[in-house]
Amino acid sequence: MQAEDFFRVISEFEFICDDIVEIKQRVDLTKSEDHKISQAISSVEKAKKILTELFPNIKSLNYDIREDLAEEFADMY
């Protein structure tokens, strides 16, 4: 695998959150629905954080790839 594969996965999380926020703004939601969507966004953000911490530490990856990932993800959180 290449570092770009991991970067793509993380960038997809950003697109998903942006899409969810856009839907949230365009649809008239009840308080309960709004709360559930906010929880979903929070869950996606937590998953992204977990993966940005995990990817650079996967032992089976080439050292250079792990270093690239660590540098790229260091400023995310």
Image (tube, rainbow, N blue to C red):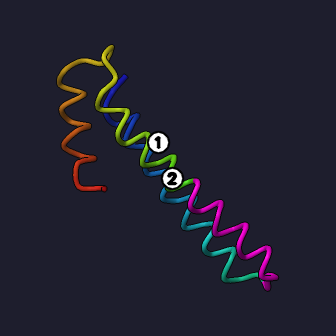
Q: Is residue 73 left or right of residue 38?
A: left
Span shown in magenta: 28-43
| Residue situated furthest bottom in the rendering | 28
Report which quarter residue 2 is drawn in: top left
The quadrant of the picture occupied by the C terminus is: bottom left
**Image height of 14 relative to 32, above or below:** above
Q: Which numbered disc covers residue 13?
A: 2
| Residue situated furthest top in the rendering | 60
Q: Name the element at disc 2.
A: helix
Near-viewer residue (76 or 27): 76
Residue depicted at x 71% and y 83%: 26
Residue type indicated by callout 2: Phe
Residue beneath disc 1: 9
Mark 1 Cα shell of 10 Å, populated few (<14), some (14-19), many (≥20):
few
Residue depicted at x 79% and y 75%: 32
The quadrant of the picture occupied by the N terminus is: top left
Mark 2 Cα shell of 10 Å, populated few (<14), some (14-19), many (≥20):
some
Residue 9 covered by magenta stretch: no
**Image height of 75 relative to 30, above or below:** above
Q: Name the element at disc 1.
A: helix
Near-viewer residue (2 or 70): 70
